[in-house]
Structure formats: structure tokens, C-alpha cells
Image (cartoon, rainbow, N blue to C red):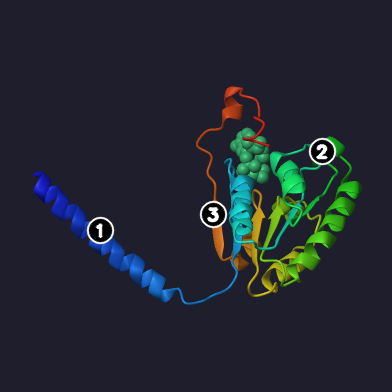
């Protein structure tokens, strides 16, 4: 194919694409916060959530972050937010991974105490963005009542966006979220014996 033909073909394809995108932009006429679920087995769920935290902070938005599992391991996001972003409400469950503690009753109590921090955020319109990191496991283990969690996510203030991360989560949760993305694992460094990396994995 000649370059001229290739260029003409490309132009036609781009025009078609633009018409489609323009129509979608035109059709999106609702102005409100979005509920996002980042799930799947691959790496990138929590990091994506913290990418949105950074975006929101860029506009001076009010942000709340509640982490439902990673208790004992310090993370770069925790250090940074605590040291440099006092305007971000940051809370962590604090009991560590469940397979470390192996104490179901203690886990349920920790889950409920942590949910008691998240719930008021979901009812407070001054929060522009609320991140509920690893919340799905609390539902998967039945540590928190699914109905209550779903109602709180659904009935949150209209302008508030919420990001939930974690594998699984169930169909009822997927149903009420506006955006659901699955991070698919193609490969992970860990399986090749590479240790979790500071600043990349935690
Ligand atoms: P990240 O926080 O890096 O975005 P994530 O939130 O998608 O990861 P989690 O299941 O919360 O994934 O896992 C947190 C930690 O486990 C990170 O150190 C991450 O690199 C690692 N991890 C994520 N996916 C995998 C995987 N498929 N195999 C091994 N380790 C993984
Ligand atoms: Mg995660």
C-alpha cells in the first residue's frame, strides 16, 4: 500500500473514531461522583487508587483513605500521606494480615472498628474522594454485613467519588459500582522469585 493510501485510510479511521468519541462525550451529561471498583488478581489495584488520590489532591480536594488489611507493613503511601498531606484522613485497620493473626474474632472486631471510620466519610459531603483499600476481603470473609456496606456506598453524597480495591467482592458490589476494572495478571515478578520492592510494591 502506498504511503498516500495508508495516510488516507488512517485519516478515515480517525474521523470515524472521533465521531464515536464525540457522541459519547455528548451523551455523558450527568455530573456526579463515581463509584469505582478495582479488582482482579494482577498487580495495580491499590496503586491505581493512590494515583486518584494524587489527582484529587492536585485540585485541593478533600480525601479520605481507609485501608482494610495492611496493618503491620508500612507502605510508602502511608508514610507520604502522613508526613506531607495532613489534609488527608488516613486510617489503617492495624491488625495485619489475617493469615498472620489467625484470630477470627479479633479480625471481625478490627473490621468493624475500621468500618466505623469509613462509614462517616461516606456520609460526609465534604469528602470529594474516599478510598476503601482492600475492602472486598471484609465482604468475602463476611467480616462486615454486605447489605450495610452496599447501602453506604450507594447512598453516599452525590458529588463524592469512592474507590474500592481488592480481589473478588461479589456481584452485588459490582452491580452498584459505576466503573469496574479487573486487573488481569499476565505475570508477576514475585513468581520469578523477585522480592517485593520498596516504593514499587509497598
Ligand atoms: P499494588 O498495591 O501494588 O497496586 P494490588 O493492590 O493490585 O497491588 P494486592 O493484592 O493488594 O494487589 O497486593 C499487594 C502486594 O502484593 C503488592 O506488593 C503487590 O506487588 C503484590 N501483588 C499483587 N499482585 C500479585 C500477584 N499476582 N502475585 C504476587 N504478588 C502480588
Ligand atoms: Mg491492594
Q: Is residue 180 left or right of residue 107?
A: left
In front of the other: label 2 or label 3?
2
Looking at the picture, how far across and down is residue 122, in whole percent? 74, 67
Mark 2 and ligand 1: say if the CB distance to the nearest ligand atom is below 8 Å: no
Tag 2 residue: 72
Ligand 2 resides in the quarter of the picture at: top right
142, 101: nearer the viewer = 101
Q: Residue at x 83, y 53 (%)?
A: 111
- The alpha-carbon separation of the residues under discs 2 and 3 comes to 28 Å
Mark toward the start of the polypeptide (2 vs 1): 1
Q: Position of residue 120 (x, y in %)?
A: 80, 67
* Pointer 1 residue Cβ closer than 8 Å to ligand 1: no
In the picture of the structure, the residue carrying the numbered disc 3 is 181
Q: Does 21 appear above or below 48?
A: below
Judged from the image, the secondary structure of the residue bearing numbered disc 1 is helix
Q: How many marks?
A: 3
Residue denoted by label 1: 14
Q: Residue at x 10, y 50 (%)?
A: 5
Is disc 3 surrounded by few (<14), some (14 to 19) or many (20+) residues within 10 Å? few
**Corner quadrant of residue 43:** top right
Q: Secondary structure at mark 2?
A: loop
N-terminal of the pair, mark 2 or mark 3, is 2
Amino acid at each position: 500500500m502506498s504511503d498516500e493510501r495508508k495516510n488516507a485510510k488512517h485519516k478515515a479511521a480517525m474521523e470515524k473514531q472521533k465521531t464515536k468519541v464525540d457522541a459519547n462525550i455528548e451523551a455523558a451529561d450527568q455530573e456526579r461522583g463515581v463509584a469505582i471498583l478495582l479488582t482482579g488478581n494482577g498487580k495495580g489495584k491499590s496503586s491505581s487508587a493512590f494515583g486518584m488520590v494524587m489527582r484529587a489532591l492536585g485540585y485541593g480536594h478533600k480525601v479520605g483513605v481507609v485501608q482494610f488489611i495492611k496493618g503491620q507493613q508500612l507502605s510508602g503511601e502511608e508514610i507520604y500521606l502522613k508526613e506531607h498531606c495532613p489534609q488527608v484522613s488516613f486510617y489503617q485497620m492495624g491488625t495485619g494480615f489475617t493469615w498472620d493473626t489467625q484470630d477470627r474474632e479479633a479480625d471481625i472486631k478490627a473490621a468493624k472498628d475500621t468500618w466505623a471510620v469509613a462509614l462517616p466519610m461516606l456520609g460526609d459531603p465534604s469528602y470529594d474522594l474516599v478510598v476503601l483499600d482492600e475492602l472486598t476481603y471484609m465482604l468475602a470473609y463476611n467480616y462486615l454485613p454486605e447489605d450495610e456496606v452496599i447501602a453506604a456506598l450507594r447512598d453516599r453524597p452525590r458529588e463524592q467519588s469512592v474507590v474500592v480495591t481488592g480481589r473478588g467482592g461479589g456481584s452485588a458490589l459490582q452491580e452498584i459500582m459505576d466503573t469496574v476494572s479487573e486487573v488481569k495478571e499476565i505475570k508477576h515478578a514475585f513468581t520469578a522469585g523477585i522480592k517485593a520492592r520498596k516504593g514499587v510494591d509497598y
